Image: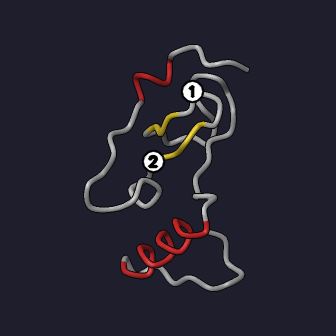
Amino acid sequence: MTCKGICIRHRAQKPSASGRYTSGQKRCQICEIFIKWDGLWCPCCGYRLRTKPRNKKYKARLRTGQNQQGIIYTRYSKL
């Protein structure tokens, strides 16, 4: 699985007000870019897209952003 360059058409601009994951962007680890895509798999390489941050600081920021949007977050629920 390698990047074929198709993902460049779906490249997402960084949002100024909120985080990337809260605005619906997803990250491909193979292509190493954030894309605006509705599917779960990268249109370019077929690798699964990351929908949640891995860093502890950004995970907390995602949770607070979701709470402000009215989404109830519990410790055991999935994001």
| Image coords of residue 20 (percent x, y) | 42, 53
The residue drawn where x is 37% and y is 76% is 69
| Image coords of residue 55 (percent x, y) | 60, 62
The residue drawn where x is 68% and y is 39% is 48
The residue drawn where x is 41% and y is 73% is 65
Query: Would you name the residue on which mark 2 appears?
Result: 25
| Image coords of residue 78 (percent x, y) | 66, 71
Judged left or right of residue 56, residue 58 is left
* Above or below: residue 71 compared with residue 40: below
The residue drawn where x is 47% and y is 56% is 21
> Label 1 to label 2, Cα distance in Å?
14 Å
Question: Which quadrant is the C terminus positioned in?
Answer: bottom right
Judged left or right of residue 40, residue 61 is left
* Above or below: residue 70 compared with residue 79: below
Disc marking residue 43:
1
- Callout 1 amino acid: Pro
